[in-house]
Image (cartoon, coloured by chain):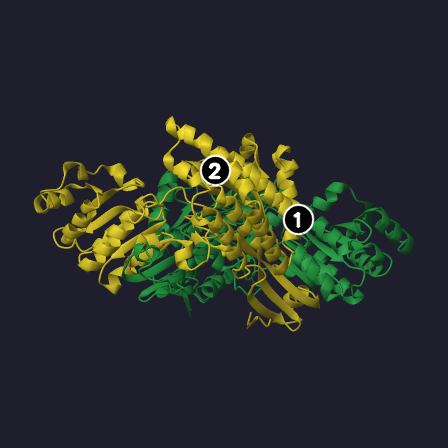
Chain colours: A yellow, B green
Amino acid sequence: MSLTESSATDIARAASLASRRLATLSEADRNGALTTLHDALLRNKSFILEANAKDVKSATREAESGNLSHSVLNRLDLSRPGKYDDMLKGILSVRDLHDPIGHVTLRTLLDDGLVLERVSCPIGVLLIIFEARPEVIANIVALSVKSGNAAILKGGKESTESFVAISQVISDAIADTQVPQSSVQLVRTRDVVSSLLDQESFIDLVIPRGSNDLVRFVKDNTKIPVLGHAEGICSAYLHSDADPEVALKVIVDSKTDYPAACNSLETLLVHRDALETVFPDVAEALLSKGVCLRCDKPAKAVLTKLLPATPVHLLQDAVDSDYRTEFLDLTLAVKTITPSQPGSLAVDAAVAHINSHSSKHTDIILTSSRGVADTFMKGVDSAGVFWNASTRFADGMRYGFGTEVGISTNKIHTRGPVGLDGLTIYKYLIRGNGHRASDYSQGKRKWKHQRLSP
Amino acid sequence: MSLTESSATDIARAASLASRRLATLSEADRNGALTTLHDALLRNKSFILEANAKDVKSATREAESGNLSHSVLNRLDLSRPGKYDDMLKGILSVRDLHDPIGHVTLRTLLDDGLVLERVSCPIGVLLIIFEARPEVIANIVALSVKSGNAAILKGGKESTESFVAISQVISDAIADTQVPQSSVQLVRTRDVVSSLLDQESFIDLVIPRGSNDLVRFVKDNTKIPVLGHAEGICSAYLHSDADPEVALKVIVDSKTDYPAACNSLETLLVHRDALETVFPDVAEALLSKGVCLRCDKPAKAVLTKLLPATPVHLLQDAVDSDYRTEFLDLTLAVKTITPSQPGSLAVDAAVAHINSHSSKHTDIILTSSRGVADTFMKGVDSAGVFWNASTRFADGMRYGFGTEVGISTNKIHTRGPVGLDGLTIYKYLIRGNGHRASDYSQGKRKWKHQRLSP
């Protein structure tokens, strides 16, 4: 913890040096460190909860005076039933995941005695910036150690006391393991973030975990690659031949299961031929759950006619910006889809709308036709494209990854829910016996280029 | 070509729109376009060579007045024996590579009737900025079309006439194919580069192909991810137990096969116990090829004693900056490696030197010990780490990738020689039948998470 007063460069350089040693540790050493960490956090539960209570107390005052939302207060409170134990269990479940390091993903016999391998390895140094939830610290430290990456963590001001206490326990625990001390650095000083974002020669990846504003701030202020998503504007396209029951179940779940999540539905595109067939029942179900529908003219006309009892505040006129808005509550933008010109397909118009309006997170189609679904799934350029299934499935646990670092809407490296694999890259190894490249260019030897089983 | 006068935003937006349609084309359509392209370039050979002759003429004048290097002049000349035919053959060999799009790399049964797939897909829009070689245009267009990515190409001023002629032929040819016109845009205006580098909402990846200065300029002037390497500072570590014949062959090949290449050797690290055993023969062989050795004191003392006839200009004192220099000619920095403290290993000192001095391109070890080699290969954080094999093997053709987009020293996405795979990413597809996420969180249904064969 002595490093918290040091400059960003010192922190980043120390992380970089530590990352090289961490990358060479065995799986047993890395897993052993996670056990030690788990035990230390278990042993120091009351110490940490006392510190956390101070944060909760300050935050309660802030919330009462209206300066802090109650959801932040809830996220902060580590003493809520099951929360601390879940944090502890989380460390062990990351420990027990398959080792992401050292996988041979390609093996080629280049020539007799000359073998090329591509082997997975840690990326190097991660900078993780997060807001309220103090249990994220344990989660992120576990993911970093498991994947052999050094981590620099910076928490939010609401969780300062919890952060200090957890930092101290983690630092002391790490000292008893093979993991180099500087491979987990918890930075408490507030003004160091901008300087850390400048350390592109030492830091390889930034992972912001928190509000859209935080992600946007980070993306706008660094040249280091950023893993994450600023927003989740997810759409559903209701095709004319959608099964009514499937459509209703999936759309209601996508919108109402947890409206504040990034994988919740924000825009519903309705084929014009579905307006008076499948759509009304879907709309009625949404309205009955309190969802406000912001409709374009054709959709509103249909609902006004068929559902005349709808309260005025739940049936509004859409404006253009609604189709680019992440509402994160019980509001849904509705747009009618017609083929863009005679002879063209409605599904192409839906795909075009999504590609120019969505945030490339997750978009779905409701249709009974495999052909239409295939066109949609090929055409939509998003991390997740689903057919007759809820947007809410876009999640690392639900995908079966065991854990999730975040959801990426980037176009390179890793996309969608990011598991441990997203924290790895690879290197190429060649083992030879005095092989010269010139022998091949001069025709003295010939390439074999024979794929071997990895 | 009407787009060359448009603004960077128009160019980038058009590429983005075109990329969505290109991404849905079948392999046959993409391959067919490459055949059409090949045939058009074959048919218009004399037209293009006439334009190229104008560039060569201007460049010759520039070279004679000392304003242009002869190597640039050589790279410019498309009429050199075999060059045009190689360009044409290159298009067909890219066409005949395995389709990188549509591979299912993960398939999981989430629950009955609910299947998750991870499928490879194009990245989207590439911006390729290159310098002299006009044949790169055909190569890049072929790679982009094959991988389903839209490409915006910007050539260097030396190849203006060739670029205009090739652009025209390619644009006309593309018009006869399924590939949308705007998916290949060749930009001739010079001042548009900076504006293109600002188009991060439409352009997904920048690939600079040319000098280190070009790569550095691009990296410093965009927020779009850049694929490439600014420099190749490759090192060899000569361990005390290296086989003399292997060491000599590999080091001489690494340094002298093609000194101007990024995968050539720039630094030789010599274990102190190898100074008077294996090193002298290696040094003698290098000196006989005209390599100038910039040595630290111990290495120079040994060579002065054992090779007293060495010309003074080939045996120089090293300065610190030599160990961070990409010489790109017949100069090699030599440094003696001693364990950093009693009880530590020399190989660890070599690894530490490389991790703090090399450019993470390719580094090699010469040793007879598998254990020492393993320590080196695990510890060195570079795209390529070889044992008893030349640095010059770091190359897409030599790795068996069929072609190469460039060599990446990035820490994320793709590392080392980049083949077609480096121009792809993936998306997650789910096919269901009305599945709701809430059924799983409420315990009404249970996850199966059963891995299926892709």
Point out residue A269 in the picture as x, y percentages from the top left corner. Answer: 23, 49
Give the quadrant of residue A185: top right
Q: Position of residue B17 (x, y in %)?
A: 33, 48
| B50 or B151: nearer the viewer | B151
What residue is at 64 percent from the left and 41 percent from the top? A13
- The disc labelled 1 sits on which kind of residue? Pro
Q: Nearer the viewer, mark 1 or mark 2?
A: 1
* Residue B374 location (% of width, % of height): 69, 62
Q: Chain of mark 1?
A: A
Q: Is residue B136 left or right of residue B325?
A: left
- Judging from the image, what secondary structure is the residue with disc 2 in? helix
Mark toward the start of the polypeptide (1 vs 2)? 1
Q: Residue furthest front?
A: A46
Relative to residue B43, is residue A154 depicted above or below? above
Residue behind mark 2: A218
Which residue is under mark 1? A180
Query: What numbered label is drawn on residue A240?
Result: none
The mark total stands at: 2
The answer to whether A287 appears left or right of B106 in the picture is: left
SS label for mark 1: loop
Amino acid on which disc 2 is placed = Val
> Who is closer to the viewer here, A90 or B53?
A90
